[in-house]
C-alpha cells in the first residue's frame, strides 16, 4: 500500500518546512480507522499480509524542526543526490540513517507498527546516497525486533548495496517498462544483481511504466514463478495487473503461474536455506555452474 495507508496526501510538493498536518508514523483514518482490527481481519479473513510503503524522509514540520536541531537531516539528500538541492521532492527532508542516534529515534517511532500488524516494509525512493538503504534497514530491523525479538524481518527495497541480504532485505529492479524488451532483459539483470550480492531479488511483473497486455503479463508471470521474489506491480495510471482486468485466457494463465509458484515453494525455501548455510546463490547464471565453458558466459535465457 502506498502513501494512502498512513497519510491523506503525498509529500512530493512539500517545501523543506514540511506540513504540520502531515503525520509520518500514523494511519489514514479513512482507510484504516481501527488499524489493529483492520489488519487482523485482512490476515484472518483473507490470508493477506499487509506491507506499508516507507520513504526515507519526513514530512511533518515539528519533526523536521527537531531533526534539524540535532543535525540528522542528510546533506544533499535529494533524489540521487541532486545538486543544487532545490526544486526536487524531498528537498532538505531526507534522514541521515548513518547516524546511530537518528536510527534509534526512527526505530522508536516505527516499532508500534509491528504489534499493530504490519508484516513488512516496502522501502521506496531511498537513492539519497550509497548507504541510505542499508542503514535504513538497520533501523527497521531494530524497530521490528523491539516488539518481535524472535520474528523474521523482511523488507522490499528499490535499490541495494552489498550486505543488505544479511538483514533479509530484498530488492526489486526498479521501474522497468511494460514491453518485451524489458522482459527479455530481466533474467540477465537478476543474475547480475545476484552475483553482485543481492540474492533476494525480483521485479515489477508485467512492467511498471506503461500499459501491459495479456500475452506480455502471461510471459512475465511464467518467468516470475522462478524468481526469488514474485511480485506483480504497475504504475497507478494504467489498469492494475489484477487477473480480473484481463481476458479469460490471461486469467487462466495467471492462475496456472500462481499454482506453479506454490508448487515450487518448498524448492524455493530449500534454495533459500542453502544460500543461508553455504552462500550458494538462490538463482545463478550458467557460468557459475560451468565456469570453463565459454559458450555459456553470456547466456541469460537459462
Image (cartoon, helix red, strand yellow):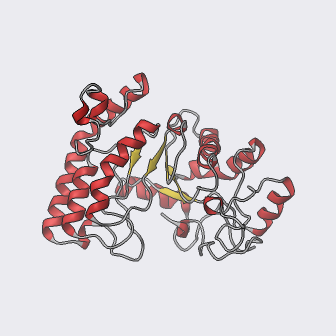
Q: Residue furthest front?
A: 294
Percent position (x, y) of residue 88? Answer: 65, 71
Q: As displayed, is residue 82 above or below residue 289?
A: below
Which corner quadrant of the image does residue 30 belong to?
Answer: bottom right
Residue 200 pos. (x, y %): 42, 41
The residue lying at 37 percent from left, 48 percent from top is: 189
Apparent side of residue 174 relative to residue 109 in the rendered image (left or right): left
As rendered, which of 89 and 188 lies closer to the eye?
A: 188
Q: What is the total number of numbered labels drawn onto the structure image?
A: 0
Q: Residue at the location (29% across, 41% down)?
A: 298
Rendered position, 270 above or below 224: above
- Left/right placement of residue 26 relative to residue 249 reads right
Q: Is residue 133 above or below residue 36?
A: above
Rendered residue at 30%/48% (across/down): 187
Residue found at x 28% / y 70%: 212
Residue 229 seen in this snapshot: no
Can residue 256 be spotted in the picture? Answer: yes
Residue 142: give x, y in percent of width and height. Answer: 64, 40
Q: Most extreme residue toward the top, as rendered? A: 278
3 horizontally vs 112: left or right? left
Q: Quadrant of the C terminus?
A: top left
Image location of residue 117, percent across then percent down: 52, 52
Amino acid at each position: 500500500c502506498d502513501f494512502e495507508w498512513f497519510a491523506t496526501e503525498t509529500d512530493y510538493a512539500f517545501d523543506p518546512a514540511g506540513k504540520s498536518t502531515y503525520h509520518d508514523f500514523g494511519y489514514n483514518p479513512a482507510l484504516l480507522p481501527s488499524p489493529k482490527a483492520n489488519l487482523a481481519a485482512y490476515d484472518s479473513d483473507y490470508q493477506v499480509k499487509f506491507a506499508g510503503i516507507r520513504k526515507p524522509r519526513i514530512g511533518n514540520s515539528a519533526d523536521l524542526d527537531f531533526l534539524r536541531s540535532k543535525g540528522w537531516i542528510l546533506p544533499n539528500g535529494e533524489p540521487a543526490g541532486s545538486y543544487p538541492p532545490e526544486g526536487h521532492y524531498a528537498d532538505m527532508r531526507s534522514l541521515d540513517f548513518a547516524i546511530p542516534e537518528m536510527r534509534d529515534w526512527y526505530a522508536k517511532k516505527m516499532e508500534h507498527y509491528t504489534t499493530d500488524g504490519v508484516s513488512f516494509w516496502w522501502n521506496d525512493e531511498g537513492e539519497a546516497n550509497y548507504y541510505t538503504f542499508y542503514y535504513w534497514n538497520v533501523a527497521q530491523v531494530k524497530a521490528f525486533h523491539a516488539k518481535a525479538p524472535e520474528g523474521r524481518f523482511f523488507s522490499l527495497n528499490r535499490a541495494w548495496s552489498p550486505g543488505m541480504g544479511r538483514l533479509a532485505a530484498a530488492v526489486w529492479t526498479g521501474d522497468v517498462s511494460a514491453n518485451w524488451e524489458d522482459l527479455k532483459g530481466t533474467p540477465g539483470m537478476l543474475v547480475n544483481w545476484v552475483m553482485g550480492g543481492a540474492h533476494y531479488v525480483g521485479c515489477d511483473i508485467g512492467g511498471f511504466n506503461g500499459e501491459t497486455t495479456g500475452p506480455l503479463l502471461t510471459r512475465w508471470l511464467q518467468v516470475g514463478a522462478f524468481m526469488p521474489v514474485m511480485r506483480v506491480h504497475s504504475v497507478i495510471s494504467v489498469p492494475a495487473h489484477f487477473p480480473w482486468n484481463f481476458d479469460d485466457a490471461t486469467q487462466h494463465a495467471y492462475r496456472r503461474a500462481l499454482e506453479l509458484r506454490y508448487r515450487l515453494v518448498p524448492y524455493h525455501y530449500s534454495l533459500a536455506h542453502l544460500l543461508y548455510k553455504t552462500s550458494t546463490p538462490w538463482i545463478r547464471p550458467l557460468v557459475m555452474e560451468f565456469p570453463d565453458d565459454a559458450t555459456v558466459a553470456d547466456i541469460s535465457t537459462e
